[in-house]
Structures are given as C-alpha cells and as structure tokens.
C-alpha cells in the first residue's frame, strides 16, 4: 500500500515523540531507536494520519518556514482543537492565536518548540 506521511527531523526526537503523543493523544505505530536513545525513525497515528519523527543528525540542514502541517478537524470538534492548541503553544511562536479567521470559526497557526509549523482548525 502506498501512503503519505508528515515527517519531521528534530533535535531531541525522543522528547518530541512523547510531546506529540501527548498533544495529539496519538497511538505509537512503530519506533526504531538509535543507541543514544534518540530516534532513527518513529511513527504516530495522529487522527488517522501518520506523523513520523526522526532525529536531526545533519547540522547543515536549514530549518525553514516554507512548510506547514494542517489538521482540519471539522465543525463540532472545537474541544479537540482547543486541547491541541493548549499543548502545542508551550514555548511556541504563535503566528495566529486561536480564534476565528476568514475560513474557519476556530483556527490557530504556530511554530512549536521543535520548529514545526502547525495550522489547526475546525
């Protein structure tokens, strides 16, 4: 089966895995640790989508702002969006705080403490 996934490479991948597992109440699909406890590869089930997390090992990688992971939950899922926002906003750079926007009654745009940009909305 072919599949697409969201993949992040971060420093502190083992901590990031725990963070995202808590934020999204996600189920661990697979984990392949490195000998130092960081992650060669791991996968979480985030509301039916795969979030893959690996350790950033190349110091020449430039972290950019040209990518964003968008999670659309749909009307009636405001409680989920509030919970996720409350957990992601810790040490985050808030681009657009949680609130209404032109295309949604509840939306937020932020870069989390691992440098990953998220848009969450109903």
Image (cartoon, helix red, strand yellow):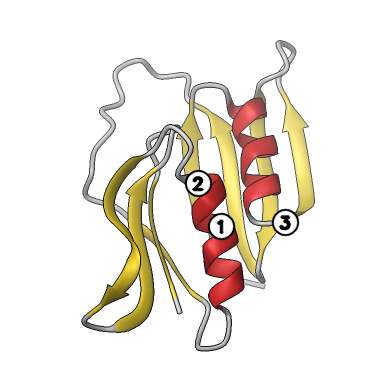
Q: Do the residues labelled 1 and 2 touch (CB within 8 Å)?
A: yes
Q: Can residue 4 be seen in this view?
A: no
Q: Residue at x 69, y 47 (%)?
A: 21
- In the rendering, at what x and y percent does residue 93 appear? 31, 39
Q: Can residue 78 be seen in this view?
A: yes
**In this view of the protein, which residue sits in the foreground, 26 or 29?**
26
Q: Residue furthest bottom?
A: 75
Res 116 → quadrant: top left
Q: Indicate which label's residue lies in the foreground, 1 or 3.
A: 1
Q: Do the residues labelled 2 and 3 touch (CB within 8 Å)?
A: no
**Label 1 crowd (10 A; few <14 / some 14-19 / many >=20):** some
- In the rendering, at what x and y percent does residue 43 appear? 68, 48
For disc 3, the marked residue is: 25
For disc 1, the marked residue is: 84
Q: In this view, does 87 lie to the left or right of 121?
A: right
SS for dot 2:
helix
Q: Residue at x 48, y 37 (%)?
A: 90
Q: State the mark number for residue 88.
A: 2
Q: In this view, does 77 lie to the left or right of 107?
A: right
**In this view of the protein, which residue sits in the foreground, 73 or 2?**
73
Q: State the mark number for residue 21.
A: none
**Label 3 crowd (10 A; few <14 / some 14-19 / many >=20):** some
- In the rendering, at what x and y percent does residue 54 appear? 57, 34
Q: Residue at x 56, y 47 (%)?
A: 87
Instruction: Quarter of the image for the N terminus: give it.
Output: bottom right
Disc 2 and disc 3: Cα gap in Å?
Answer: 12 Å
Disc 1 and disc 2: Cα gap in Å?
Answer: 6 Å
């Amino acid at each position: 089966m072919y599949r697409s996934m969201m993949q992040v490479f971060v420093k502190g991948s083992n901590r990031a895995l725990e963070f995202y597992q808590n934020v999204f109440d996600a189920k661990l699909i697979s984990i392949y640790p490195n000998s130092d406890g960081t992650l060669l590869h791991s996968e979480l089930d985030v509301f039916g989508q795969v979030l893959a997390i690996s350790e950033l090992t190349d110091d020449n990688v430039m972290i950019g702002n040209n990518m964003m992971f968008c999670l659309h939950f749909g009307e009636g899922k405001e409680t989920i969006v509030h919970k996720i926002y409350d957990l992601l906003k810790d040490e985050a750079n808030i681009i657009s705080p949680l609130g209404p926007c032109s295309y949604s009654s509840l939306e937020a745009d932020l870069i989390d403490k691992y440098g990953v940009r998220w848009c969450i909305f109903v």
